Amino acid sequence: MNDLLTPSNASAYDASSIQVLEDMEHVRLRPGMYIGGKDDRALHHMVAEIIDNSMDEAVAGHATWIEVELHENGHVSVRDNGRGIPVDPHPKDPGKTALEIIFCTLNAGGKFSGDSYQTSGGLHGVGSSVVNALSDHLSVEVARGRELYRMRFSRGVPQGPLERVGAAPNRRGTSVTFHPDPEIFGALRLKPARLFKMARSKAYLFSGVEIRWKSAIEDGETPLEATFRFPGGLADYLNETLNGATTYAERPFTGAVEFREKFGVPGKVEWAINWTPARDGFLQSYCNTVPTPEGGTHEAGFWAAILKGIKAYGELANNRKAAQITREDLLSGGCALVSCFIREPEFVGQTKDRLATTEAARMVEGAVRDHFDNWLAADTKSAGAILDFLVLRAEERLRRRQEKETARKTATKKLRLPGKLVDCSASSREGTEIFIVEGDSAGGSAKMARDRRTQALLPLRGKILNVLGAASSKLGSNQEINDLTQALGVGLGTRFNLDDLRYEKVIIMTDADVDGAHIASLLMTFFFTQMRPMIDAGHLYLACPPLYRLTQGAKRVYCLDEAERDLWLERGLGGKGKIDVSRFKGLGEMDAKDLKETTMDPASRKLIRVTIDEDEPGETGDLVERLMGKKPELRFQYISENARFVEELDV
């Protein structure tokens, strides 16, 4: 027995065990920390990073055109006629040029001080270097000072020094050509249609630039060449998006305001909005030409201006019902585009999906509000039609809410709710959540951690039935599925009615391990095949319980995975003494305090909304059928094709 504890059998842990990764090595090991993963979205995000650099040159007034070209071999080139990346030696590292520093060093760029760019989309100094690290080939050509220079890289490593190619008296700017590394992205390929849409949207966002598109790959729907220049900016974008649909305003409410005029700071906001009965509403927002699909402070400021303006107009028109209008009503049929340019914006994450700059809300609201008031007063016909439409939407919303409150109060009489459901006490669906938890032990901790007023719990025993791999007759007889549908108050398949859903958020909460991921996959398959409208409406979420808890003195940090754990161990917690690392084996081992703070409390938790992102109709369904269906050979084929791209799991 004692032999088991001898040094010869124990794993050595000393200074040699501590790894220090270079910038490019860390990007390749953990690409998800920089571009969000290794999926199709991350692949195309690489192109966006390079285009954004050229757009920053255009917005700053140094470039008038940008060319995006997709080559037959899968390479992509982005060219501009800007100033060109500096090629002289860097003052802090004279042995390297500024170009090499930009493409090989994280947190290096010309957009930190604000001296080179008043506003820019690239702020973290990692875009070009991350693209370089995740490309098996990248070449940069710079025409600067009437000379042409070139430097080549592979997986972030220079393949030689910067070389002077020759004279270029009639050329200026930067050209970047790269090929995403198959070791990272596997069989994924850049799609012409997606890049075409990306290039066109950039031209709408800045009327002063011309975007040129070229493609050597035919997909049957995307032109091989096109040139985009839209003097009308977002107004042109909105008109094309609505495509002749009937609208309540004859002309959309559009405008642009320089922040310097109103607030004394550089930047501006541009917008376009109209209401239509022909389609669902949307808001597409951008900051410094970077899409922000999760919104942020600029969206909040825009909607605040529109909501206050329409309510004020309703008061002037003696329409008392206008006071009932909410942001939800504005979104119903309201089609809007908002683009702001601000100095040193704060984004959430490297992929910049959400803007967090507090001042943006105040400036956007202040800039839009006055113009909206004037627009409503100048076009009373359109203003009256919009007000009447929004009042009707508000009345309809209030009527639905009242019906749901009445239905919920008597739900226990109408529905045979499963005995293990721990329901919430709120009478309306708005603001309520149901956590689908794995096992009774996790349900016990969650029961103590929940907010009894708004949070319900449904423990499931073991793994739910794979609805794609089982006979259809088993669905009606499966107890777990029956409990789940009864708790949600809805039917399956064609009998599903979104209005019957009893909770605003349906949250899958499983252990942060392989078994938990499997259960979550089975549940998402069930919801996708039997309750897809619930996903389309944004009601399905995944909880993000931590895998580790790090403690150092009074300091405590929770980590979602090994990468985050290693990052904190390297950085330190800021406390005193040794860092204690605890791994949660499951939700059942977490006490109520830990579970509430990390996973259930809306003020501190992280949630992932489940969405369906597909370029072609049925694309997601085909993939789900392949992975979860009755044909194991298709699943085996997919695993064989992609297994080498999966990182080793520490389980």
Image (cartoon, grey):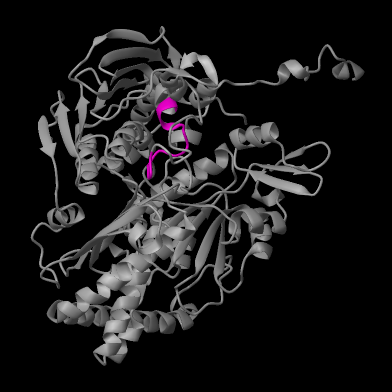
User: Which residue appears farthest toward the right when viewing the image?
Assistant: 2
Question: In which quarter of the view is residue 271 placed?
Answer: bottom left
Q: Is residue 111 above or below residue 419?
A: above
**Place of residue 272 in the rendered image (x, y in percent of width and height, measured from the top left):** 22, 61
Q: Is residue 284 above or below residue 309?
A: above
Q: Residue at x 35, y 83 (%)?
A: 324
Q: Work out whether residue 42 or residue 428 is closer to the camera in this orientation and state it.
A: 42
Q: Residue at x 17, y 52 (%)?
A: 237
Q: Work out whether residue 358 or residue 45 is closer to the camera in this orientation and state it.
A: 358
Q: Is residue 479 visible?
A: no
User: Magenta segment, which residues?
Assistant: 117-129
Q: Residue at x 26, y 93 (%)?
A: 318
Q: Is residue 325 above or below residue 128?
A: below
Q: Work out whether residue 548 or residue 564 is closer to the camera in this orientation and state it.
A: 564
Left/right of residue 209 with respect to residue 544 in the rendered view? left
Question: In which quarter of the view is residue 572 placed?
Answer: top right
Dividing the image into 4 quarters, which one contains the C terminus?
top right
Q: Residue at x 50, y 57 (%)?
A: 507
**Place of residue 37 in the rendered image (x, y in percent of width and height, measured from the top left):** 44, 34
Left/right of residue 152 with respect to residue 434 in the rendered view? left
**Place of residue 485 in the rendered image (x, y in percent of width and height, measured from the top left):** 43, 63
Q: Is residue 430 above or below residue 473?
A: below
| Magenta span: chief secondary structure | loop
Dividing the image into 4 quarters, which one contains the N terminus?
top right
Magenta stretch: includes residue 412: no
Q: Is residue 501 visible?
A: yes
Q: Work out whether residue 292 or residue 507 is closer to the camera in this orientation and state it.
A: 292
Magenta stretch: includes residue 126: yes
**Place of residue 554 in the rendered image (x, y in percent of width and height, measured from the top left):** 80, 49
Left/right of residue 16 with respect to residue 498 in the rendered view? right
